Amino acid sequence: MPPSDSTGRLLRILTILGLALGLSLPGLSWLGPSSAWAASASTQTGAASCGKNCPKPARPAFASSDEAFIAARNAAGRSDAAGLEQAAAQAGNDPLIGVYLDYWRLRLRLAALRRTDSDTPLASPVDDQARDFVARHGQTIVGDLARRDWLLALGRRQMWTSFDQVYPDWILRDEAAPRCYAIQSRLSRGEAVMAESRDLIMQPRELGDACNDLLVALAASGQASPADLWQRLELALEAGNAGTVRRAAMLAVPSLDNRQLETALSRPAAVLDGAASRELTVIGLVLLSRNDPNAAADRMSAVGSRLKPTDRAFVWSQIAANGMRKLLPESLSWTREARTARPSDETLGWMTRAALRSTDWSTVRSCIERMSDAGRSEAVWTYWLARSLQAQGDKPEQRAQARALFAGIAGKTDFYSQLATEELGQKITLPPKAEAVAAAELAAARANPGFARAARFYELGLRPEGNREWNFQLRGMSDRQLLASAQYARQLGFLDRMINSSDRTRTEFDFEQRYPSPFAERLQPIAREQGVDPAWVYGLIRQESRFITDARSSVGASGLMQIMPTTATWIARKMGVRDFTPSQINDLDTNLQFGTFYLKTVFEDLDRSAALASAGYNAGPGRPRAWRGTLTQPVEGAIFAELVPFTETRGYIKAVMSNTVWYALLFGAEAPSLKAMLGQVQPGPAVAAKATPDGN
């Protein structure tokens, strides 16, 4: 008699335990097809004893070809070539996306290619396979991904002739590694390449193997000067990754003692206790400041004399930036100590935030003016530079310069553009709506094979692959084509792709595509019942889930309003919902009711501040309470948003509040003042009574 489901599961567990222990469990042959994986495991376990006479391993059984395709994709993701082949054998040949099976095979083979000890780089049969695949599929996203993987394999083996033939056809140009190999290829021919290498290697981040190889080659050729290599070490210290610092230090200071360097990396305070060199002192102080800025500042009085003035300014800049990441009150005084430093734009951004918190407009201006041209041109720093000039505007030319800066970023859709528009005394208005998409335009979008492939991936629940296919088709599209693509996405029910496509238009706009309001007949009554502005709720949903009803975050949040299971349970108790189970949060009405209730509760708990409540919805209410507790004076809501130490939450507040303005206009309200909605954030106790759980 076949077992029940629970018995079957138990027996399958016993089978795999027995196999792991080398035991035989007779009498389980009736487990059936669903246990083919166990039979396969048993066959493989006995392979050593039966030799050539072993039966072929049984293929794992999948309920459908779709399930097998997903298993193949997952196997490729973990570099499991055998698992990929087993699943691919049962995945069939899907006419839309079956080519991905061949791509995943090729990708694993290319990833295995490495340079040999031979002075002459060796070609491989895999190169021929890549050449053939790219020739057949090169204008599709899967073909361009294969081209990228092939470029990486050629670069690792320094096969520059082949690399140079393939590189011009690479379409996306969205990754640093192939670009670093392309420059290294030119360097191998004796070309001067240091100037264009700077954007790739002179950033405060981990470089990766390809760009590290480029840096080493630049140093060996003499194109990277000792000053360049020291700058790279400073940037590595800003990034803080031990491996990055180690590689940069050995290039910048070849005479450095390895043991002392390892001490500086693992125990930075210890290396400062002895008579460390100037280089080790810089390394130790900066790394110490990442965890304990106050300790690093204290040590500067004892060991600062070992350093050059430029070193001292750099170290102070890092102490200031790391202090501000922790919202320490001393960060502004440390920023002032670093007034001559010229670190990265990222560090100068944190120093600017330290000055903003105290509205020290002179220091705000000084920090922003030391940024690169690219840094100063970002809307965030353009806005605050203009505000600093406005605040110090005793002279007409300063006020005129501030207005010119505001005008340069006003009239767009983002947070700082909206604030700049208000500073100019203008109202935020909806742009004229573009002409409706014509039938022929929509038909062209419908005929796009890339959109069909994206739809197939969405059907399988493989959203990253679907998004990549969809976005690839949008390259080079006119505004009319983008609007048609957005309209087609709406028809398919892919509201996130509708937003993504419509957001890209430059001169023709359809804000009902960019800021959709589905489920209005269900959401608006719920929002009114809770006393929450529907425009704010929609602004939040647009940021949380892009209206993907079955959205799941990496940490387990669910639905349109991305509610965590523990928070849902708390909400259910507060709302008096009996017999609640976490799976109910995926029901649309429940998700909207719970999400708006939670938003209202957080809003009430945080002094009815929209800025604080938006931060609390994203990061948990305890965090904005703690952040507010570091303030020594009231600050504008916009300043508070900029002070938030979490990059995601900082961007979240700005996006939600900016979205709210557009939704209010679409719902027929007069343009609300974003600055007024943000209000002021008052200082508060660092630890406040908690009325809500941390997390949404």
Image (cartoon, grey):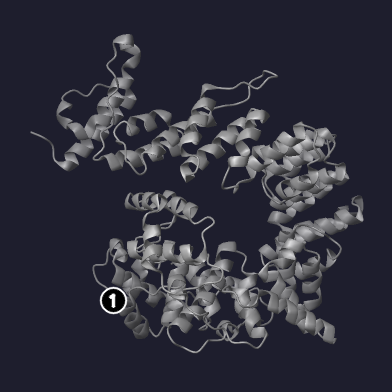
Horizontal relation, residue 142 to residue 549: left or right:
right
Name above or below for residue 676 compared with residue 620: below
| Identity of the residue furthest to the front in this view | 440
Instruction: From the viewer's side, name the closer residue of 601 and 626.
Output: 601
Horizontal relation, residue 691 to residue 398: left or right:
left
Name above or below for residue 454 compared with residue 577: above
Name above or below for residue 287 compared with residue 107: below
Residue under label 1, please give it: 576
Horizontal relation, residue 547 to residue 91: left or right:
right
Instruction: From the viewer's side, name the closer residue of 225 and 511.
Output: 511
Q: Residue at x 61, y 71 (%)?
A: 627
Which quadrant holds residue 421?
bottom right
Which quadrant holds residue 304?
bottom right
Q: Is residue 102 something that shows in the picture?
A: yes
Horizontal relation, residue 399 to residue 458: left or right:
right
Which quadrant holds residue 400?
bottom right
Coordinates of residue 237 in the picture (x, y in percent): 74, 49
Coordinates of residue 402 in the picture (x, y in percent): 76, 80
| Identity of the residue furthest to the left in this view | 1
| SS for dot 1 | loop
Instruction: From the viewer's side, name the closer residue of 316 and 168.
Output: 168
Coordinates of residue 116 in the picture (x, y in percent): 63, 21
Mark 1 neighbour class, 10 Å CA radius: few under 14, some 14 to 19, many 20 or more: few
Q: Is residue 564 something that shows in the picture?
A: no
Q: Locate the C terminus and report the quarter of the image it occupies.
A: bottom left
Instruction: From the viewer's side, name the closer residue of 398 and 316.
Output: 398
Name above or below for residue 526 compared with residue 107: below
Q: How many marks?
A: 1
Q: Locate the N terminus and report the quarter of the image it occupies.
A: top left
Q: Amino acid at mark 1?
A: Gly
Coordinates of residue 376 in the picture (x, y in percent): 74, 66
